[in-house]
Image (spheres, grey):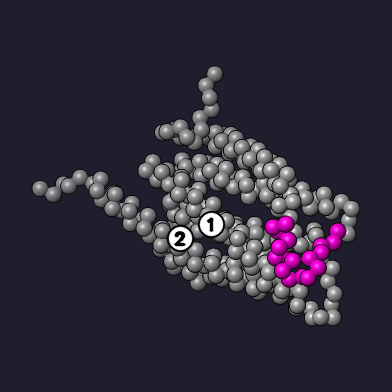
Amino acid sequence: MTALPTSEAPGHHMTVWEHIAELRRRLLICIVAVALGGVVAYIAWPLLIDLITKPFCRQVEDCQLYATDPLAPFTIRLQVSLYGGVILAMPVLLWQLWRFVTPGLHKNERRYVIPFVVCALLLFGMGATLAYFALGPALDFLFGVAGPDVAQIPTVDRYLTLTLYMMLAFGIGFEFPVLLVALQLVGILQPRQLASARRYAAVIIVVVAAVITPSGDPITLAVLALPMYLLYEASILIGWLVARRRSRNAAADVPDTIS
């Protein structure tokens, strides 16, 4: 019995059904990786909850979060474990994504797999870290916007949801240039297209940042939108460099026909 061709098979042109089978296989691998990461995060709950609540404790003296539902502590622990599983499984997720899109690249461009995964991991970590440190000023703004006459009772589910959503939103937002570079590598986008769309991109980035940030405060919006635009410019520069290298390699492959 012959094995089903995969995207790693050199020179093989996959059919639609083979692409679907390949996608299903890689999704299953991603699900298993997230599940295993979630188990690790569930076990490491005391360390995670201590780390996540530090920005809150810097803003509130008693550092006390409340649960208004008997099921809230358990459901929150499961939710944190799920997000933690996604973060821990990120290397596997990015690797599977890259291996799935590899057939759309030239053979000499497939060596970019390691830089792709490393850059994606670094950018995701940078985004999540930036969200973590931006959470303090965001909480300060949110706690003070209603004035001293409004007493707040912070619940553990709302706070952890806000924190985890912010870290994921920033991490995913920082993956924006990786996606743009990948689209330029496969020929879907060109650097000149991205350069000519700078004004539209700036508006879209602000809108996307406003949508994906759960707090909705202007501080978080600015902290996310500005790096995203700088990364957009970086993706254009990388696209120009890749296009220039392609042109130079193509010129080197053309035989000299001038006598």
Horizontal side, residue 111 vs residue 37: left or right: left
Residue at the spot 60% in from the left edge and 57% down from the top edge:
172
Look at the picture and state if 55 lies above or below 189.
below
Q: What's the distance in space between the residues labelled 1 and 2, CA to CA? A: 13 Å
The magenta-colored residue range is 50-67
Q: How many marks?
A: 2
Q: Nearer the viewer, mark 1 or mark 2?
A: 1
Residue at far top of view: 1
- Magenta stretch contains residue 226: no
Image-quadrant location for residue 104: top left
**45 or 195: which is nearer to us?**
45
Quarter of the picture holding the N terminus: top right
Amino acid bearing label 1:
Leu
The mark found on residue 123 in the picture is 1
- Can I make out residue 13 in this image? yes
**Where in the figure is residue 209, as x and y percent of width and height?**
62, 66
Residue at 85%, 75% (x, y): give it: 151
Residue 202 location (% of width, % of height): 53, 70
* Residue visible at 62% across and 47% down in the picture: 88
Whether tag 1 and tag 2 are in contact, CB under 8 A, the answer is: no
Looking at the image, which is closer to me, 54 or 255?
54
Decide: is 67 above or below 36: below
- Front residue of this view, candidates 245 and 62: 62
Is the residue marked by circle 1 packed among few (<14), some (14-19), or many (20+) residues within 10 Å? many
Query: Which amino acid type is shown beneath numbered disc 2?
Result: Ser
Secondary structure of the residue carrying numbered label 1: helix
Residue on which the image places disc 2: 235
Mark 1 vs mark 2: which is more N-terminal?
1
**Taking 62 as reference, is 160 above or below it?**
above
Residue 118: x, y in percent?
49, 50
Relative height, residue 243 to residue 90 (above, below): below
Label 2 residue SS: helix
